[in-house]
Image (cartoon, helix red, strand yellow):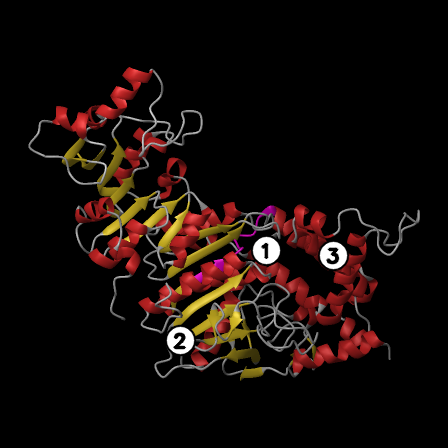
Amino acid sequence: MTHGAATQSDRRNEAIDPSSAVVRFGADAPLALEGGGTLGPWAIAYQTYGTLNADRSNAILLCHALTGDQHVANENPVTGKPGWWETMVGPGKPFDTERFFIICSNVLGSCLGTTGPASINPDTGQAYALDFPVVTIRDMVNAQARLVDHFGIDTLFCVAGGSMGGMQVLEWAATYPQRVFAAMPIATAAKHTAQNIAFHEVGRQAVMADPDWRKGRYLEAGTRPEKGLAVARMAAHITYLSEQALHRKFGRNFQDRSAPTFSFDADFEVESYLRYQGRSFVERFDANSYLFLTRAMDYFDLAKDHGGVLARAFQNAKTRFCVVSFTSDWLFPTRDSRAIVHALNAAGASVSFVEIETDKGHDAFLLDVPELFKTTRGFIDSAARARGLPASGDSAL
Amino acid sequence: MSPITLTEDAASARVDLHNLAALVEAGSRVLDVGCGDGSLLRLLAEKRGVDARGIELSQSGVNECVAKGLSVIQGDADTDLVYYPDASFDYVILSQTLQAMRKPRDVIDHMLRIGRRAIVSFPNFGHWKIRLQILTTGRMPVTENLAYSWYETPNIHFCTINDFIDLCDEMGAQIEYASALDRFGMPVETRLPRLFWNLFGEQAVFVLSRKI
């Protein structure tokens, strides 16, 4: 067994038998899917932090991005790295675990314990692979709603997330307006643009072009489309950064050498970095999940679901919104956030909008950006006061 | 709901903000265009129980507002008012910002469309000190309230109280209330004829509505 295969078996364990808590729904409680048909039995894996209060009014649902997972603020069982939003979630942090009950679940179609293409298809006893239904952002949200039901929570105090997580936030507000008191969509859009879809298609084609993909049946074949998935990740990773950030980090610096080798080695630091990003990604993520989740994002078009008018998605919304974008994000640029804000204005919703100055690109929502912390803290605290929940630093305000 | 306590910030808000706030019906819906750091919005929310929203151009201003818990969006009054539906607010306020608009008339037009009433306050370029400065120095006036040199001022569309009244007539806007203020934001003696307002008012406040 190679080292890679050992990691693969670890990952399969997380997909089928996750270390997270899981709610399992039997064939008698299937999930109806937007594309038609149902999924069942199915499972949803999640992490929680903090304590649910007596009237169940302090729950915050965090929605993860494309390749994220439910491990927001604990060591990741696959990578051993810190949680993906430890900057934002914890005692005294903007999403304060001492005051709020934080829930994050693995999205439908992913590979960390919620049902996805790496899960076992009860009809065949083998992984679903491409037999898994094409799920949508709304399906993900409906699955989360079942988890929220499971906790006996009627109204979530807040739903927040960035990128694909932000799409889920918007879908929550549109589909379950009565169940969302406050919503924070970050670095996201109400629809995927042609350019967004184009980048995803490059990634999918890279995976499918890898002979080890085996038309999706790589798990049974004992192979893994490592090269294809790594290329997909490398291309995608560029879109998460900005030109300025790449220049600041790498410039034209050489990697462990002082002159070009006149070969196709990773002469440049930026090449070496991308190769590393590709390699480490295939260690932790299922290739078929990548296909399904990118597809779900491509299909997202909230206005289309409401007669082509985005404002209708938020009609009579009582939810208070805080929309955040980043100046150097060219994947989900500020104009996408403005479109959301204009629709919310037109719907008469309560909305704040901040464009945060940073050169860190789309990934800024995951990074140490003090303005994001400040904005989140202000928004969450004021929403908490409006909801009759304790706010941090009431007096310091 | 937790009881609303007046913060120090709101209690010590400037006199002119209090005067503006007094023009707003308690419990109404207000949009403050160019809301800065949110001082007026906060005052309205805390003292008048107003559903207060804002638009502000600067990121630092917006961030301060959001940190204060106000619903404020980053945007440009000259371009973004178009996205607000008709009659969606009771009041739309433009406080000391009219002169910085690229198209002041269009902005007022939108304010009257979006709000039942528009409240506009602006520095009066007809004040005697300004007239005197131009007369005596032959140069663009620089005063305590208007402290910029002509080449760097954000104030690109000055007007006098008389000019503003003319514009209201032209636009078919009804003047429901008007007041000229001294440099401290206190009303100039209101029994004086308007000729005197235009001489002695450093600022003016108008409440407008659309003529029906």
In this view, the mark in front (1 or 2): 2
Would you name the residue on which mark 2 appears? A58
- Magenta segment range? A183-194
Q: Residue at x 27, y 42 (%)?
A: B93
Tag 2: residue type?
A: Asn
Q: Where, by quadrant of the figure, is residue A305 drawn?
A: bottom left
Q: Residues within 10 Å of mark 3 (few under 14, many from 20)?
A: many
Residue A289 image point, x, y percent = 66, 67
Q: From the viewer's perspective, is B117 left or right of A367?
A: left
Label 2 – label 3 distance at C-alpha: 39 Å
Q: From the viewer's perspective, is A106 left or right of B134?
A: right
Mark carried by residue A298 = 1
Q: Are marks 1 and 2 on the same chain?
A: yes
Magenta-colored stretch includes residue A189: yes
User: Which of the chains bears the disc numbered 2?
Assistant: A
Label 1 – label 2 distance at C-alpha: 32 Å
Tag 3: residue type?
A: Met
